[in-house]
Every structure is written in C-alpha cells, then in structure tokens.
Amino acid sequence: MSRRLVVPLAALAGLAVLAAGAWLWWGRAEPRPAAFTGEPTSALYALIGSRQADAAPLRLDEVFTPAGRTLGTLARASAEQLDDCDEALWGVTATGCTQALRATYTSASGDAGQFVIFNLPDGRAADALVAALAEDGFVRQAVPFDASRSRAAARALGHYVTVAWAGASGPGADPVKTLVALDGLGRVVQSRVLAAT
C-alpha cells in the first residue's frame, strides 16, 4: 500500500473516532442526575398496590396543595397534569400510565428542582419504571439547573412512582436540602393508603 493512501485512511479513521466520541458525548439529548437512588414499592403500600384498589385519578390540588407553594426557600413556579406520561420522560416508557403530575420549584439562592408523580396500573409497573429510570432514561428536565451537580430519588409507592430531582444553579445552592424538600411531596400517597383502609 502506498504511503499516499495510508495517510488519508489514517485521517479518515481518526475522524470516524472523533465523530463517534462526539455522538456519544452530545448524542444524549437529555440530562441525567449526577446521583440517583431508586426504591421499589413495599408492603406498606399494599392497599394501593393496583389502580383497581385506588381508582380515583390524582388531582393537581391534591398533590400540589396551597401549603406546598413554598418548600423552605423554594417557590413553586409551575404545576401541570400531563395526560401522556411519556411527555415527562425520555428514553423510557411508563407502560399503562394514565397521568403524570409535575411541578417545578426555584429559589433566589439558586436551588431548583421538580417533582413528578406517575399513576401506573400496579406495583409491578411502578417497580419497572423505577428500574428503568436507573438505567435507560429519565424524566425530562422542566426547570433549568446544572444536572451535573444534581440529585434525584425515584420511589415506587404502590401503583405510583414519585420522582424528585434537585439541582444547583448558583454558588451556595444545596441540592441535598432541595431534594429532601421535593421528595416530601410524595406524602400525598400516604393519604391514599389511609383512604383505602
């Protein structure tokens, strides 16, 4: 093989490697949290282990109450119901999900985050979504923050899945405190358990 042919082939191979690296780096269109914990459902939520046992749809005012307009230094910026649960997700599908309720929160100190609750058919589907969020995809980021400094928690609670995702956008921002505050919105599911007794 002549030297004239080897140089262009080496250059093409180098460009192919660079293109593949760029695709892997920028190809993931959606961000993921830097730290993630996921929990399957437990016997505590057995009374609402299926939508049949807990048929009433979630309401925005039930999940995002007036008392939850502020969570410490966080202020609720938006709250919405998505009838197509996959609108709130990328890289994964919430099979059998009938609704997703999402709220975003911000603060003057740079803390920001979001909370999403998914209404799934049963605990098995809820566990499957939590497992998929750990590996295959995640919820779409609905409020700006630095995902590389963010933390998230997903919990299967009977036939529901809650996802709290907190990030830091400014100096002094604390995603851990924000995550704890957002995760507390999942207490709405305990009310459903009490109503089922």
Image (tube, rainbow, N blue to C red):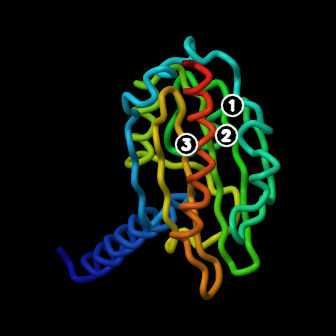
Q: Which residue is mark 3?
A: 162
Circle 3 residues within 10 Å: few <14, some 14–19, many ≥20: many
Is residue 169 shown left or right of residue 38? right
Q: Which residue is mark 2?
A: 87
Q: Quadrant of residue 77?
A: bottom right
Q: CA distance from mark 2 to mark 3?
A: 15 Å
**Nearer to the camera, 92 or 175:** 175
**Nearer to the camera, 36 or 189:** 189
Is residue 154 shown left or right of residue 98? left
Numbered circle sitting on residue 189: none
Q: Which residue is mark 1?
A: 84
**Residue 103 in the image: above or below residue 130:** below
Q: Residue at x 43, y 23 (%)?
A: 46
Q: Residue at x 78, y 45 (%)?
A: 65
Image location (x, y in percent) of residue 6: 24, 77
Point out the frontmost of discs 2 and 3.
Answer: 3
Q: Earlier in the sequence, mark 3 or mark 1?
A: 1
